[in-house]
Image (spheres, rainbow, N blue to C red):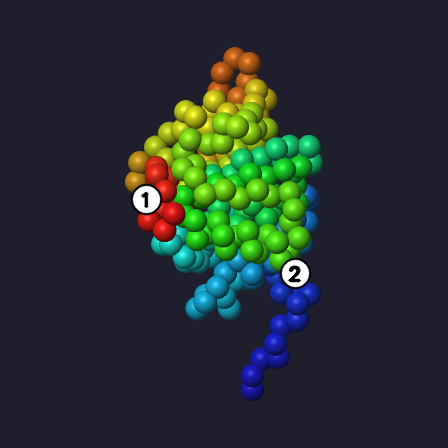
Amino acid sequence: MNEPPISEAERKMQFLYALRSKGVTDARVLTAMEAIDRGPFIRGLFASRAYEDMPLPIACGQTISQPSVVGLMSQALQVSSRDKVLEIGTGSGYQAAILSKLARRVYTIDRHRRLVQEARGVFEAMDLTNITAITADGSFGLAEQAPFDRIIVTAAAEDPPGPLLAQLKEGGIMVLPVGQSDTVQHLIRVRKTADGLEYDELRAVRFVPLLEGLGKDG
């Protein structure tokens, strides 16, 4: 006998349970992740796996991070409703959409024009009006909107990029993966204080590399 199809409420409950079991416990983050459906951010062959806690391929050779990592990064960022956030690496737009429920304003940059255009379409359909998506080289940040209260990078660099640290407000937090290869990376949190930078290592992760320049499509 075939299993009866899972209801929307059951699926959402399983999704939130999976997030909590991986350490996503912040109530505001969980509420945001309940409100933002991951489904519209995934197209094609993998659309049916949108609610599994796994990374999935998207266009331009990129990936959408697994929901638990999105949740943990959002939680580590400690975003308040007054914050202006910069995201480097729009990808599918899913992380920016979650942040839009937590922050006052989100600026998200990607080097692939196609990804930015597709993400804008989803933001518009979801009526997420506090996100600005831009095609640019994210390694330089967005100086014209600096300083930022929070910065999140969804691609791995060897070290936190200097231009991004410069655009982080004093008292601000940056969360990003760092590592010299695609096999050894760590998610870190950087706090900018009056006395300098404080670093916390959060967990091992695996992200695509942070590349300079625009993608071939952009």
Q: Nearer the viewer, mark 2 or mark 1?
A: 1
Residue at figure coordinates x 56%, y 25% from the top left: 147
Rendering coords of residue 70 (x, y %): 53, 47
Q: For numbered disc 2, what is the local secondary structure?
A: helix
Q: Quadrant of residue 45?
A: bottom left
Position of 109 with respect to 16 (left or right) is left
Position of 83 with respect to 92 (left or right) is right
Where 119 falls versus 179 (above or below)? below
Q: Quadrant of residue 182?
A: top left
Q: For numbered disc 1, what is the local secondary structure?
A: loop
**Residue occupied by mark 1:** 182
- Asked whether the viewer can see residue 83, the reply is yes
Front position in the image: 97 or 24: 97
Front position in the image: 65 or 163: 163
Disc 2 to disc 1, C-alpha distance: 33 Å
Residue at figure coordinates x 36%, y 51% from the top left: 217
